[in-house]
């Protein structure tokens, strides 16, 4: 969001009727949570997920990744 967008948002917050601050805060926090699906995960889970992603990226970079169609074909024939 650009500077003017942030200013506009601050103006809206400043114009809230008295007594609505807590509801507005909860709503804004909700927006942050839905924009980051990982936000609801415990920190340990997020760290483990990020480590898995780094490991997968390293395998791809090293040419060790197996294409999805190959994995799916192997899974289908394993039944």
Image: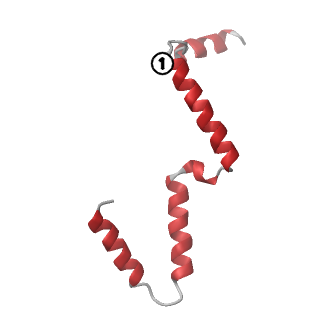
36 or 71, nearer to the observer: 36
Q: Position of residue 13 (x, y in %)?
A: 41, 79
Above or below residue 25? Residue 57 is above
Residue drawn at (59%, 48%), measured in percent from left and top? 38
User: 21 left or right of 1?
Assistant: right
The residue pinned by badge 1 equals 61
Q: Residue furthest left?
A: 4
State the residue at coordinates (50%, 62%): 31
Q: Position of residue 23 (x, y in %)?
A: 55, 78
Name the image colouring: secondary structure
* Apparent side of residue 45 relative to residue 3 in the rendered image (left or right): right
Residue 45 rendering spot, x and y as whole percentages: 68, 43
Task: Specify the quadrant of the image occupied by residue 2.
Answer: bottom left
Q: Quadrant of the N terminus?
A: bottom left
Using residue 75 as the reference point, say whether residue 33 is left or right of it.
left
Mark 1 closeness class: few <14, some 14–19, many ≥20 residues within 10 Å: few
Horizontal and vertical percent position of residue 32: 51, 60
Q: As rendered, which of 60 and 16 lies closer to the eye?
A: 60
Q: Residue at x 59, y 37 (%)?
A: 50
Which residue is painted at 66% across and 9% down in the image?
77
* Quarter placement of the C terminus: top right
């Amino acid at each position: 969001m650009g500077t003017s967008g942030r200013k506009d948002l601050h103006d809206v917050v400043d114009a809230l009727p008295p007594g609505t601050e807590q509801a507005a805060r909860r709503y804004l926090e909700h927006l942050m949570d839905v924009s980051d699906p990982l936000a609801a995960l415990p920190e340990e889970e997020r760290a483990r997920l990020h480590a898995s992603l780094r490991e997968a990226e390293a395998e791809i970079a090293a040419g060790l990744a197996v294409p999805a169609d190959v994995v799916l074909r192997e899974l289908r024939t394993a039944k």
